[in-house]
Image: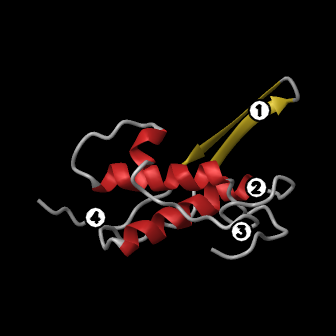
């Protein structure tokens, strides 16, 4: 990881962990509970002040959709199990005034998957 940036591409530590858990659940052919317990045997090193563990005053909104998707691509590539996705998620927003608005994030497409049996 690099140092945090001035733009909103930083991803909070929780987003980095979510990306790691997602990859583990995608790669391991057994059902893994969606909780922090499955991370116990894994040492995650995220330097404070980095783009994957920014300081609390850093902008982070883009890290949730851009940086997290790239992190997933890097982890899956490191294990050689999947081609890269589009590298971004798509956002859908709608609403007609200040009384009602909605924001949803939809993951992008993925590359080919190698399945090992």
- Ranked by sequence position, the earlier of labels 3 and 4 is 3
Picture coordinates of residue 85, whole percent (x, y) = 45, 66
Residue at numbered disc 4: 113
- Residue 82 vertical placement versus 38 (above, below): below
Residue in the image at 78% along x and 61% along y: 8
Residue at numbered disc 3: 50
Q: Nearer the viewer, mark 3 or mark 2?
A: 3
- Ranked by sequence position, the earlier of labels 1 and 4 is 1
- SS type, badge 2: loop
Whole-angstrom CA distance, mark 1 to mark 2, is 23 Å
Circles 3 and 2: CB atoms closer than 8 Å: no
Q: Nearer the viewer, mark 4 or mark 2?
A: 2
Snapshot quadrant of residue 65: bottom right
- Ranked by sequence position, the earlier of labels 1 and 2 is 2
Whole-angstrom CA distance, mark 3 to mark 1, is 35 Å
- SS type, badge 4: loop
Residue in the image at 44% along x and 50% along y: 21
Picture coordinates of residue 49, whole percent (x, y) = 76, 66
Whole-angstrom CA distance, mark 3 to mark 4, is 30 Å
Q: Which mark is residue 95?
A: 1
- Ranked by sequence position, the earlier of labels 4 and 2 is 2
- Ranked by sequence position, the earlier of labels 3 and 1 is 3
Q: Nearer the viewer, mark 1 or mark 2?
A: 2
Q: Nearer the viewer, mark 1 or mark 4?
A: 4
Answer few, some or many: residues within 10 Å of disc 3's Cα (few below 14, many 20 plus, some between 14 and 19).
Answer: some
Residue at numbered disc 2: 60
Circles 1 and 4: CB atoms closer than 8 Å: no
- SS type, badge 1: strand
């Amino acid at each position: 990881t690099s140092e945090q940036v001035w733009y909103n591409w930083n991803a909070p530590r929780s987003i980095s962990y979510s990306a790691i858990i997602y990859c583990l659940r995608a790669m391991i052919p057994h059902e893994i509970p969606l909780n922090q317990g499955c991370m116990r045997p894994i040492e995650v090193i995220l330097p404070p002040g980095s783009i994957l563990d920014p300081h609390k005053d850093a902008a982070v909104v883009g890290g949730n959709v851009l940086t997290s998707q790239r992190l997933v691509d890097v982890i899956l590539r490191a294990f050689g199990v999947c081609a890269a996705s589009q590298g971004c998620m798509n956002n859908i927003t709608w609403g007609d005034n200040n009384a009602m608005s909605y924001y949803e994030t939809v993951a992008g497409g993925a590359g080919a998957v190698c399945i090992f049996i």
